């Protein structure tokens, strides 16, 4: 879909995700019979296939939760709305922690992230600099969808990102 725009195979692709869970128990943990080589299929296939599917089709993400879906860089730190005891985003000067929806830090200073959010952010900052909402350049895009929307952040000059409520 992302390359061709053809969504005719989506329904079948979603059904195919069932194959990725054939070694997963009811509680979401990998289970395997006495033949332990299947362990890699359960953990390797299950998680990888679902992450790729959510990246290609963000509507598969849980509707009432925020999630970083994909990144072209390694995510080194993430704090969703203050879930950490000592929030890492307090390193930024003059930041009201009550207004932060998500902070994350990547390995590379250039990259693109797709983030499913419950609601549109009021602002997106990279290295404490406000990003413009734009479809090109260093900026962010908001694409509404059921249960929130998809935020696409394009970074060219930084690896610390603040998404404001």
Image (cartoon, helix red, strand yellow):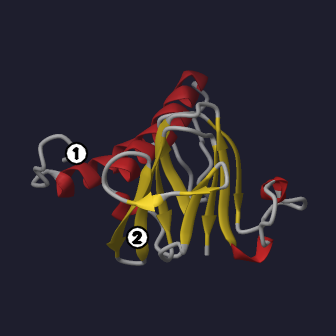
Label disc, if present, on residue 149 of the rendered structure: 2
Counting residues from the start of the chain, the first of labels 1 and 2 encountered is 1
Q: Position of residue 18 (x, y in %)?
A: 35, 50
Q: Position of residue 99 (x, y in %)?
A: 70, 75
Between residue 101 and residue 84, name the one nearer to us.
101
Is label 1 in contact with label 2 (beta carbons under 8 Å)? no
Answer with the quarter of the image where residue 81 lies.
bottom right
Between residue 71 and residue 100, name the one nearer to us.
100
Q: Is residue 142 above or below residue 37?
A: below
| Secondary structure type for disc 1 | loop
| Left or right side of 99 for 122 | left
| Left or right side of 101 for 88 | right
Q: Distance between the Cα atoms at labels 1 and 2?
A: 17 Å
Whether residue 65 is visible here, answered yes or no, is: no
Answer with the quarter of the image where residue 58 lies.
bottom left
Q: Position of residue 134 (x, y in %)?
A: 35, 58
Q: Is residue 133 above or below residue 107?
A: below
Label disc, if present, on residue 56 of the rendered structure: none
Please give the name of the residue rendered at 79% of the width and 56% of the height, measured from the top-left corner: 92
Whether residue 163 is visible here, answered yes or no, is: yes
Q: Position of residue 28 (x, y in %)?
A: 59, 54
- Name the residue at the top extreme: 37
| Residue designated by label 1 | 2
| Secondary structure type for disc 2 | strand
Q: Is residue 99 above or below residue 141?
A: below
Please give the name of the residue rendered at 58% of the width and 30% of the height, measured from the top-left corner: 39
Please give the name of the residue rendered at 51% of the width and 75% of the height, measured from the top-left corner: 118
Position of the C terminus by quadrant: bottom right
């Amino acid at each position: 879909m992302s390359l061709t725009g053809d969504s005719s195979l989506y329904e079948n692709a979603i059904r195919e995700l069932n194959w990725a869970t054939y070694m997963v128990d009811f509680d979401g943990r990998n289970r395997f019979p006495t033949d332990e080589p299947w362990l890699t299929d359960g953990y390797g296939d299950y998680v990888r296939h679902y992450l790729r599917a959510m990246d290609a089709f963000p509507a598969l993400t849980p509707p009432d939760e925020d999630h970083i879906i994909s990144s072209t860089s390694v995510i080194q730190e993430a704090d969703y709305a203050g879930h950490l005891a000592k929030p890492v985003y307090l390193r930024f000067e003059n930041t009201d922690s009550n207004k932060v929806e998500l902070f994350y830090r990547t390995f590379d200073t250039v990259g693109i992230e797709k983030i499913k959010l419950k609601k549109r952010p009021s602002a997106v900052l990279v290295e404490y600099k406000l990003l413009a909402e734009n479809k090109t350049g260093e900026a962010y895009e908001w694409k509404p969808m059921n249960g929130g929307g998809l935020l696409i952040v394009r970074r060219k000059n930084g690896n610390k990102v603040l998404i404001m409520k």
